Image: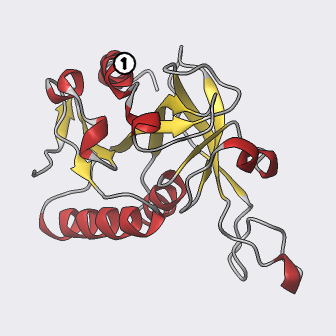
Amino acid sequence: MSYKIKPIGAHSVLYVMAADAEYGPHLQKTISPLFTGVGPVEAAIALTRTLGDLAAKTSLPDFVISLGSAGSRDLTQTHIYQASSVSYRDMDASLLGFEKGTTPFLDLPAELNLSPQLPGVPKATLSTGANIISGTDYDAISAQMVDMETYALKRVCQTFNLPLIALRGISDGSHDLDGLLSWTQYLHIIDEKLAIAVTHLEENIRNNEL
């Protein structure tokens, strides 16, 4: 499935998603996203390649919008949140004296802020990593929600000097995961709610209100 840059007023948007399972009939009516695949490595590869091609052949979008699901033990299941910041839970060089979550020799904090923020959508901190989080795994994570791509997308957007907005529907976390259905069972609800959030987002972009 090929992606399409979406013009919105005087601006342009690249929507990014990880997996087709999160792309339901409501989102299908309004966007044609770039699918990166699951995890930080695949996300970084896909978005870097795409933005590099766009920079060389046409022009970069004004915004990159990441849509999808996230886990949370504390936030309301199926509700939509925007990531206010993102951290990288896989990175731990603390045995060498570096703060946990910071990449050695890279002058960046462990937590990266995301901007602009969309008015009217609740904010939550986000942790990205290559592992599925469930049950007591949350004890080691200070962020309010977890996913597998956003930190990588943020770093790519920083490289291209582009803003990243990340909207996430909470798909799991209130109970221990037990197979694929534990993740997919609410994706149809999240699809509908994300489509509503996208409409709100596009109105703000069109009216220069971000």
Above or below, 76 relative to 42? above
The amino acid at mark 1 is Ile
Q: Residues within 10 Å of mark 1 (few under 14, many from 20)?
A: some
Q: Which residue is mark 1?
A: 189
Q: Residue at x 87, y 82 (%)?
A: 95
Horizontal and vertical percent position of residue 112: 65, 53
Residue at the limit of the structure toward the front, as seen here? 178
Horizontal and vertical percent position of residue 125: 67, 38
Q: Residue at x 33, y 68 (%)?
A: 48
Res 94 → quadrant: bottom right
- What kind of element bears circle 1? helix
In screen coordinates, is 170 left or right of 109? left
Residue at the limit of the structure toward the bottom, as seen here? 96
- The colouring scheme, among rainbow, by chain, secondary structure or one colour, is secondary structure
Horizontal and vertical percent position of residue 129: 58, 59
Horizontal and vertical percent position of residue 72: 63, 34
Q: Residue at x 55, y 53 (%)?
A: 132
Q: Nearer the viewer, residue 201 or 94?
A: 94
Residue 117 appears in the rendering: no
Q: Residue at x 61, y 49 (%)?
A: 133
In screen coordinates, is 132 left or right of 85? left
Q: How many marks?
A: 1
Above or below, 3 relative to 184? below
In screen coordinates, is 96 left or right of 25? right
Residue 163 appears in the rendering: yes
